[in-house]
Amino acid sequence: SKILIASVDLGCSEEVLTIVAMLSAQNIFFRPREKQAEADQKHARFFQPEGDHLTLLAVYTAWKNNKFSNPWCHENFIHARSMRRAQDVRTQLVSIMDRYKLDLVSCGRNLNKARMAICSGYFMFSARKDPQ
């Protein structure tokens, strides 16, 4: 919840809503034994060097751009059921945000804002390396 509140302040609530919803879904990627290399190649298209959270955002965005297509999921070795679950969770989160009159704002390509919101929510789970 802290991540969502921070995302409103940072102006990236659309992206963070999607990331949180994707985190609630089970594993979205699948890798059949007979097509492991092909699956890895398809999954690599979504890879974001900034981290898994943004990779999940890239997958959802691509799925959305393809009109939430089940065949698209199958072609890209993505579990359509998990994506639908994430879509349902996202819809629920949007309604909660609306109920509390929190703005839904996109940060566009400035995903550093989304990363900052995520870090603010996970701050308690961070650590500092002891120099010794």
Image (cartoon, helix red, strand yellow):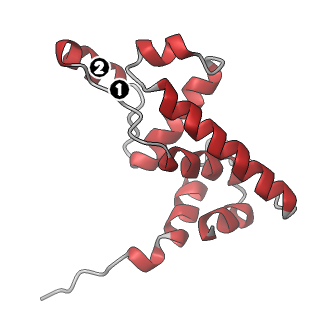
Residue drawn at 39 percent across, 49 percent down: 51
Cβ–Cβ under 8 Å for marks 1 and 2: yes
Residue indicated by mark 2: 39
Residue drawn at 52 percent across, 58 percent down: 115
Q: Is residue 123 left or right of residue 102?
A: left
Residue drawn at 77 percent across, 57 percent down: 96
- 117 or 73: nearer the viewer: 73
Q: Position of residue 47 (x, y in %)?
A: 38, 35
Res. 127 mark:
none
Residue drawn at 42 percent across, 30 percent down: 46
Indicate the quadrant where residue 116 lies. Answer: bottom right
- 30 or 132: nearer the viewer: 30
Q: Position of residue 39 (x, y in %)?
A: 29, 19
Indicate the quadrant where residue 132 lies. Answer: bottom left
Q: Residues within 10 Å of mark 1 (few under 14, many from 20)?
A: some
Residue indicated by mark 1: 43
